[in-house]
Amino acid sequence: MCIRDRTMSWFKRTKKGIQTPTELKKDVPKGLWYKSPTGKIVDTEQLERNFFVSPEDGYHVRIGSNEYFDILFDGNYKELNPKLTSKDPLKFTDTKKYTDRLKDAKEKTKLNDAVRTAVGESMGKDIVIACMDFSFIGGSMGSVVGEKIARAAGYAINQKIPFMIISKSGGARMMEAALSLMQLAKTSVKLAQLAEAKIPYISLCTDPTTGGTTASFAMLGDINISEPGALIAFAGPRVVRDTTGKELPEGFQRAEFLKEHGFLDFITHRKDLKSKVNLYIDLILNHPLRENTV
């Protein structure tokens, strides 16, 4: 045998198949750790058990409608108007056709648009919840978002049950231009009807709540609440910096700053969200206080 053959024999597998015992394999495959902005590292299973909040620094990770529905509803819920989808009446094109952006967003997120609405029991009583998904074109508010929120508010009025919106949005959807801006008025009018019917409306602002969303339904709640550290503003810090050439003070436009200046009623940890929302509903409706058994 030549020297080359003897050398290469070191690299030849003598036994076929995987020989590593199961107990010696790594328990944590790549991708099962989450690093918060402050540098804290947490196992994703632990993160999920903690309502997607980093246990060491309290950082609230951005989550979508699926997670919020799981947190707030007791179990089963009925989704309202799930098949509504956006059209492109303006034939809008920038670097990409709007229709292509919609198609890509649907394939990536498995959602039809940037908001989902549902009705179900929370601590034993019905509530209607509209929850925005930032993963769908930045949670931008187009015609479908406005229509679904308006229909959900109408459902709450007809059924006489409380209504809640969870905002997580970059604002109006520029690809729909004035049609998008019309949704600010549409949703505001529907919420006024909700108030006339004396039905509680809770607005939860999560990170980020900006633009037209802040200028309409996000700040029109009977109570406006937020998660810790959420960015809540009309023009975000990057827009302000690019426009004025100045940096904003530390903590400006964050939930704690807004609460201090009277824009928010309270800030709640995600694990307490369900109990606090239902406590408010019981108090405002003068109902016996419920206990969260979940």
Image: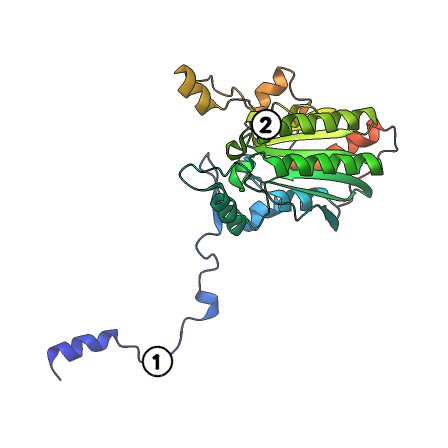
Residue type, numbered disc 1: Lys
Query: In terms of depth relative to the viewer, which is nearer, 248 or 23?
Result: 248
- Percent across and percent down for residue 115 are 63, 40
Q: In which quarter of the image is residue 184?
A: top right
Name of the residue lying farthest toward the left: 2
Q: Is mark 2 on a helix, strand or loop?
A: helix
Q: Quadrant of residue 226?
A: top right
- Percent across and percent down for residue 262 are 65, 16
Q: Is mark 1 on a helix, strand or loop?
A: loop
Q: Is residue 213 left or right of residue 6?
A: right
Q: Mark 2 points at which residue?
A: 181
Residue 182 circle label: none
Q: In this view, does 255 lie above or below 72?
A: above
- Percent across and percent down for residue 51 are 62, 43
Colour option used: rainbow
Q: In this view, does 99 lie to the left or right of 273?
A: left
Examine the rendering and report whether any part of residue 178 can be seen. yes
Examine the rendering and report whether any part of residue 271 can be seen. no
Residue 15 circle label: 1
Q: In which quarter of the image is the N terminus?
A: bottom left
Q: Circles 1 and 2: CB distance less than 8 Å?
A: no
- Percent across and percent down for residue 235 are 51, 22
How far is disc 1 from disc 2 in space, using C-alphas? 67 Å
Query: In terms of depth relative to the viewer, which is nearer, 236 or 31?
Result: 236
